[in-house]
Image (cartoon, helix red, strand yellow):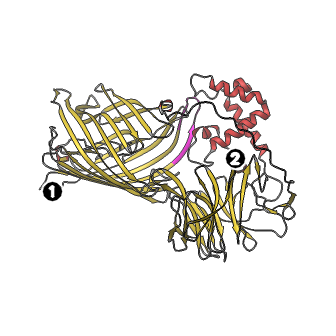
Amino acid sequence: MRAENARGLRSLGEVNAEGRGFPLNRDYLYGSYFFAFLRERYGEKAIVAFIESYSGKFLWFPVDSNPVRATGKPMRTLWVEYHDWLHARFASPAAPVEEGEVLVRAFSLFSPVLAPGGTRWYVQADGYTRPKLMRQTGSAAPEVVRELEQDTRLTATAGDAVLASELDICRNHNLLYDLYEVAADGRRKRLTDCGRYRFAAPLDDGRIAALRVSAGETEVVVLDPRGAVERALYRAAQGESLSGLAARAGTVVVTSLRDGRWSLLDVTGYNVWSLERASGTLSRWTRASNGVREISAPLGGQVLLTNIEADGDALRLYRLPDAPLEERKAAAEAAPPAPRAESAVAGADRPYSPWSSLRPRSWLPQLEIADGAFAVGAVTYGQDALDLHEYFVAPLYEITQRQLLGSAAYVYEGRHSLLVNRTMTVKASETRNNSREITTYSIKENAQWVSTWRHLALNQRFYWGLGAALEQEKLHFVDDGTSPVQNERVLGLVAGVDTRRAQWLSEGPSQGQWLRLFAETSSRLNAAYTGNVYRADWRGHLALGHSVLALRWNEAYGQPGAEPFQLGGSRSDDWIPLPVLNQREFALRGYTNGEPVLTGHRARVVTTEWRMPLADVDRHSMTPPLGLNRVSLNLFLDVGAAWERGGDPDYHRGVGVELITEPRAAYVFEWQLRAGVAKGLDAPGTTKFYLRRGRSF
């Protein structure tokens, strides 16, 4: 908060909007101090009155009037008074700052290490791509060694390498830390597998001391150089928490919190201190303006440290002074209090039931405008406490043709899905009475089941599975009536690999690719179509500074008896992460779906998009309770063709621009909308305007 005060405090509209900007936890940071402000200025009862006033309202979003009962002032007036209180509380300290020379500033900097010889190691993140392990020798420029995961912890080892405790998925279900040795050339050697090692420190003989949590118990163990456990050094007592580990020569030291008491230090303020065990003297070595987050082990009278700043982190090289800035006598060690007797909780064990946590907790409005259609609706969703069951329901009403549409989905354990849809696709429209009116449209009602099996890692996720789909389609001619019903049945095999990664500031996925493979058949299923269909759908994402280059290649092949593919429209990608079967219509912006020249048993669509964040507005007003977070620009080029076997593809091009926004309502509802204009460059292309929920892919 001291950094916020120096930079300029956030307005109430910024805090209400949450958003991506610093501080990343702004609602919690400002909220916690706000209650301290209420207690100091208006007394303890004001906090209770403030909470009760909010809790007693039928609607949650009238926020401005909420503190009137507790303070006699509306929120916008009270926020000005709160700012004055923060300015006084976090005024710049009179003592000179002692925190060292800035080496680099970035979105995130963590795990600084000073290795023998003075080599500096640290992890740096820009918020747009995966964090990078950095290495700097002497006065040379820092170099990127390799990418790592967020919150990886480093420790110097013998030679030009570091020991890294890095997060990954273990056996498809658990997020655990394992140990790796990373060399200066980027080569990585795995030392443990599903080991749960959050802290580690190398010993002089090549072995490793590590802290792990297993089956709810914390222990310090010694690993051999290959990562195998040799023996346990210490097991935490009941109620004891081990929060840090260090080693020198053959000595291993841990920090322990037990019965509310730290076993080594109890010092307020985030600065660098040392403890002389013989005399029990605490010595302070830094006076950081905003506190010190992490430090390296001292080497040659220097340490690397990271600071929190208003717009990110700073890595500093700090030369320790000849004498400490402050000294204190450590409090005399007292015997820990006797552990409290824990009474048994009344009640019998019972099997887990998801029903109490499955109720929907919120909803979002829907709005879609495209090709003369205008639809409004809502989305609600929910999941149980263990995230085994997940569902969403999204009813939608199309006003011009008075059609009830929508979709619903249920997913179990992220692997098995049931999906039901009723969708409307405009096949033809024309200008009548100075407005675009629909002349032909289709209504599709479909249901599908897909089950998958998978092998998961954070950077590489494989899946394979099978499923089935049913579909019924009616073609409606607005002026002439309805065509007969067309029934479809499909069995399919699916597989794929997903290496995409999205970061806090990136515009959707910014790295990696996603390949989906489909093999489907309608043979001998007594449906309107027969034959097999094969499809490969590839997406790639490449970070270009703060923007993203997104690519897609969708290739489809159908036998003569299969349902032909149709290109056209501006349909958004399915939100569900599992494969969707029986897809025969693919977006080609600037064209109407169902044109004869864009229909065939072979199809290919290639898309290039350049997605660029324009502004993180991050504002939310109180009256009316509406807000806006990010606004982004998307420039795209679609190239597609549909043709019959033996023929040649006739490619049609579409270009356009989309404005992608993230509107908010009533503080808790947020969604993504893209408003676009597309121009079909080849006949029968036209200029089309549309408003859709979600991305194109």
- Residue numbers of the magenta segment: 615-627
Look at 79% across and 53% down and name the residue there: 267
Residue 167, above or below 28 = below
In this rendering, does residue 625 appear at all?
yes
Look at 66% across and 75% down and name the residue there: 116
- Give the structural element (helix, strand or loop) at label 1: loop
Report the front residue among 394 and 517: 517
- Give the structural element (helix, strand or loop) at label 2: loop
Q: Position of residue 336 (x, y in %)?
A: 80, 48
On screen, residue 347 versus residue 498, left or right, reads right
10 Å neighbourhood of mark 1: few (<14), some, or many (≥20)? Answer: few
Look at 28% across and 42% down and name the residue there: 569
The amino acid pointed to by label 1 is Asp
445 in magenta = no
Residue 421, above or below 170 = above
Q: Position of residue 252 (x, y in %)?
A: 70, 65
Which mark's residue is nearer the viewer, 1 or 2?
A: 2
Q: Which mark is residue 239?
A: 2
10 Å neighbourhood of mark 2: few (<14), some, or many (≥20)? Answer: few
Q: Which mark is residue 648?
A: 1
Q: CA distance from mark 1 to mark 2?
A: 73 Å
Report the front residue among 168 and 633: 168
Look at 72% across and 54% down and name the residue there: 256
On screen, residue 256 versus residue 586, left or right, reads right
Q: Position of residue 677 (x, y in %)?
A: 35, 44
**What predominant SS class does the magenta segment belong to?**
strand
The amino acid pointed to by label 2 is Gly
On screen, residue 109 versus residue 500, left or right, reads right
Residue 77, above or below 135 = above
On screen, residue 354 versus residue 560, left or right, reads right
